[in-house]
Amino acid sequence: MTTRIRKAVAVAVLLPGLLAVSACSSDKDTDGAKNEKASPTAESSPTSPAAKASAEAKRIGALDPQKLKTATLSGKSGGYEFKQVSEADAEAGLDMKADKAECQPLASLAGGYTHIPAVSVEHRSLEPSEAKNATVGSMWLASHSEKNAKQVMSDLRTSLEKCPKGFKTLGLTYKDAKRLKDPALGDEAVGYRITMTVAKKSVPMTYTVVRKDGVIAAFYGVNMLTPEKSAIPEATIKAQLAKLS
């Protein structure tokens, strides 16, 4: 794949977040847990967002922010390079609200989050290690109680049943949500494909959402050359799941 094509594909992957940034109101309220970075002193305070998230994780039996970060891949693994995503870019998708309530689980995943708020979330961009691989994408891990993680998966399945025509959010259009064969990954997994329309261009995106205990691991891939090959490979997903074991 040429450098020019690689860059075009990368832009397609980043577009949802970039458009979300421009569509979001600058004065919108945000949770303390996802606000600007705190200083080391502030992070050690029992009232800091990090401390509150850790306390909540302990209360519900979820991975705390530090353990989730440690369990998230960085660097090369499974044929891809896992790159950290800036906090600003990751949070651009927080306000992905679907125009139809039954589509919200899909809209939240399109923004890089789960519709049930997680204790903490880690985001990574995925770039193929080999030039011949035209599939790029993103991954994020969301830490929940096991009960909530199971609910996320159940609601996702329901959303795919009730929202096959897609939805609109923040000026973006997502259409043709189609469930694929569920892969045998983690404790349970759901695969689906949905098409995003940007500047009159259709961008098919393939999602693989996996639950491992209380962690939701979501992957999506884009392949502008061969859309039916846009799923992130199972070997790559298994490399991440192994870190959660």
Image (cartoon, rainbow, N blue to C red):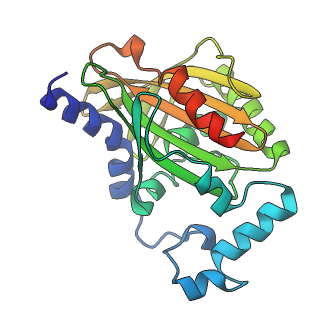
The quarter holding residue 224 reads top left
The quarter holding residue 172 reads top left
| Residue drawn where x is 71% and y is 84% of the image | 47
Which x, y percent locates residue 194?
48, 23
Position of 4 relative to 44 (above/below): above
| Residue drawn where x is 68% and y is 23% of the image | 185
Left or right: 170 as drawn, with respect to 143? left
Is 223 in front, or is 62? 62
> Visible in this render: residue 165?
no
Is 148 in front, or is 23? 148
Q: In which quarter of the image is the C terminus?
A: top right
Left or right: 11 as drawn, with respect to 69? left
Position of 245 relative to 70 (above/below): above
Is 80 in front, or is 85? 80
Which x, y percent locates residue 58?
82, 63
| Residue drawn where x is 60% and y is 21% of the image | 191
| Residue drawn where x is 35% and y is 24% of the image | 135
The quarter holding residue 137 reads top left
Left or right: 194 as drawn, with respect to 81? right
Which x, y percent locates residue 39?
51, 84
Is 41 in front, or is 116? 41
Q: Quadrant of the N terminus?
A: top left
